[in-house]
Image (spheres, rainbow, N blue to C red):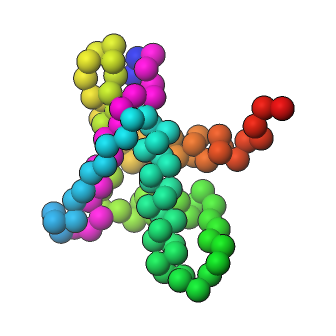
């Protein structure tokens, strides 16, 4: 991708084999898309454990969730090309990991 590596991002999900489980989300940036992906996973964890006050997970749990989806991909706008670039499951996992590392990093002093 060109220099605009944080462009408009469309996330495409297929939760199960049934085509009716397909959905998509539009986000201004890759970072916002990764926020939404994590929020989607956290919502699922809360639904599975409604009596747990503080939900915790690690990267392997998030990757397991991503792998459990029937299909997931992203389209990221490359402004230099004026086109959307398709990105696969592994790319999404890599970006999710980078995003979580950024979130966990101490802020500037």
Up-down: is 108 above or below 96?
above
Give the quarter of the image for residue 98. top right
Query: Where is residue 46 drawn, in percent x and y?
Result: 52, 75
- In the displayed structure, does residue 49 sit left or right of residue 44? right
Query: Where is residue 5 drawn, in percent x and y?
Result: 45, 25
Give the quarter of the image for residue 30. top left
- Residue at the extreme bottom of the image, as rendered: 51
Of 29 and 99, nearer the camera is 29
Give the quarter of the image for residue 92. top left
- How many discs appear? 0
Q: Please tell me whether residue 53 belongs to the stretch shown in magenta.
A: no
Q: Residue at x 31, y 43 (%)?
A: 26
- In the displayed structure, does residue 22 sit left or right of residue 45? left
Up-down: is 27 above or below 78?
below
Magenta-highlighted stretch: main secondary structure? Answer: loop
Up-down: is 78 above or below 9?
above
- Residue at the extreme left of the image, as rendered: 19
Q: Please tell me whether residue 11 belongs to the stretch shown in magenta.
A: yes
The quarter of the image holding the N terminus is: top left
Q: Residue at x 15, y 63 (%)?
A: 19
Query: Where is residue 91 drawn, in percent x and y?
Result: 44, 40
The answer, for residue 29, to whether it is visible in the render is yes
Q: Residue at x 27, y 51 (%)?
A: 24
Of 48 and 85, nearer the camera is 48
Of 17 and 74, nearer the camera is 74
Up-down: is 60 above or below 31?
below
The answer, for residue 87, to whether it is visible in the render is no
Region of the chain picked out in magenta, as a range: 3-17
- Residue at the extreme right of the image, as rendered: 109
The quarter of the image holding the C terminus is: top right
């Amino acid at each position: 991708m060109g220099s605009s590596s944080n462009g408009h991002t469309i996330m495409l999900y297929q939760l199960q084999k049934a085509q009716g489980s397909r959905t998509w989300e539009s986000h201004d940036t890759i970072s916002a898309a990764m926020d939404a992906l994590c929020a989607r996973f956290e919502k699922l964890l809360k639904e599975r454990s409604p009596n747990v006050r503080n939900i915790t997970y690690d990267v392997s749990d998030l990757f397991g969730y991503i792998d459990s989806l029937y299909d997931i991909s992203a389209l990221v706008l490359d402004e230099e090309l004026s086109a959307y670039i398709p990105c696969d499951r592994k790319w999404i996992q890599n970006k999710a990991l980078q995003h979580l590392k950024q979130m966990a990093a101490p802020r500037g002093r």
